[in-house]
Amino acid sequence: MEPLILTLGWIGLYAPLALGAVGSMIGCARAGSAACGALLEVEGGYGRYIGVAAMPSSQTIYGIVVTMALRRDLTIENAPGIFGLGILVGLAMLYGAIALGDACASSINVSKSKLEVFGISLAPAALVEGFSVFAFVFALVLAAAIPK
Amino acid sequence: MAEPYITLVSSLPYLTSFERAERSPITQLRLEQRLHNLEPGDAKQLAIAEGLISWRMSLAKPKTDKEMVLRYRAAQQEISQPALREFIEFRIDQQTILAGLRQSKTVFESAFLEQASGASRWAAFIASHWDIPDFKLAAVYPWIPEARSYLDNNDACGLDKLMMSIIWRRLSLIAESNRFGFEAVFAFVFKWDILQAWLARDAVQAKSRFQELINEVKNDR
């Protein structure tokens, strides 16, 4: 039983980074595809579209920080907590990055035709990012409560 | 939901409503270049649908109702995309009702049914309510009385505008159902088609086209 619990602990330890990275890959690919399409249609300001397409990479950064915060010698006492916290925050990062990619793709799609809505069209993306930040911050707070 | 055409949809310009547009935001050549990004199967289905229900005169379209029914049946075998099938059905229903409205004062219902049966699900229903101005379909298609009044007043332009507006709204809903999918792509293509047809309105050209059609009918005989 003990090796299984320790294995789950290792999974939980790496989940925030791995799942966050997977989400960022999908999100950046979606937003990046939209940015590439928009480049064909606009005459300038290419950088802003590529910049928006990079927004879903933030979940990987949050994942790295949470993984570092969870890092400690795994014991039978702390492995279940690390597993639960790591998996859940990892899933939040995964879905957050995908949703952020969709929101960014939509923002790019509308602002290529109407540049004046560029800022406001990013509001849904900012909201999604906000929820990721909640998940990230509270993961850090709870990580401090897991026994060393 | 599958969103395989993010790049393609993002590369297409915004289409202003055809009534307000002064020019097409994308040329046919440029649009065709962009549509090269479609999967071969989707491109084929789109081409079949365009040949069947587009507005533009430049595409080889069926000349008689019978020919239309035959081509529609063949298209049903080829088109597997549910949203595109549904849109074609919607257009065929619309065209069948319009044909009924046009013919209701000049031919018998049996003649109409012979031409239109096998196309729209409403053909038999229309024939069985032939003497009623809206064929008892106004509850399903609220535009029928308005279309009837345009026909009675020989206002072809008003009728076209009404039909185009209805299709435009339908296509907007279809595009919203999958913003980066095939639905958005074909909705754009058919909207662009309406826009082209609307912008190409020209009384002199229409007269010469009408003459061409008369000559074709004469030669067929």
Image: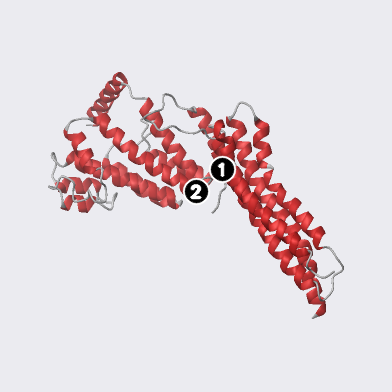
Q: Position of residue A107 (x, y in %)?
A: 58, 40
Nearest to the observer: residue A14 or residue B24: A14
Q: Is residue B137 left or right of residue A21?
A: left
The answer to which of B181 and A113 lies nearer the viewer is A113
The image's mark for residue B69 is none
- Residue furthest toward the top? B204
Mark identifier at residue A106 = 1
* Type of amino acid under label 1: Ser
The answer to whether A109 appears left or right of B19 in the picture is right
- Would you say B91 lies left or right of B47 here? left
Identity of the residue furthest to the right in this view: A73
Q: Secondary structure at mark 1?
A: helix
- Crowd around label 1: few <14 · some 14–19 · many ≥20 (10 Å): many
Residue B50, placed above or below residue A129 = above
Under circle 2, the secondary element is: loop
Tell which subunit mark 2 falls on: B
Residue at 70% from the left image edge and 54% from the top image edge: A22
Residue B52 visible? The answer is: no
Chain ID for label 1? A
Question: Label 2, on which residue?
Answer: B178
Check the image and report above or below for A81 versus B42: below
Name which residue lies at 84% across and 73% down.
A75
Same subunit, labels 2 and 1: the answer reads: no
Q: How is the image coloured?
A: secondary structure
CB-based contact (under 8 Å), mark 2 and mark 1: no
Callout 2 amino acid: Asn
Q: Choose between A146 and B126: the one closer to the eye.
A: A146
Does residue B29 appear in this view? yes
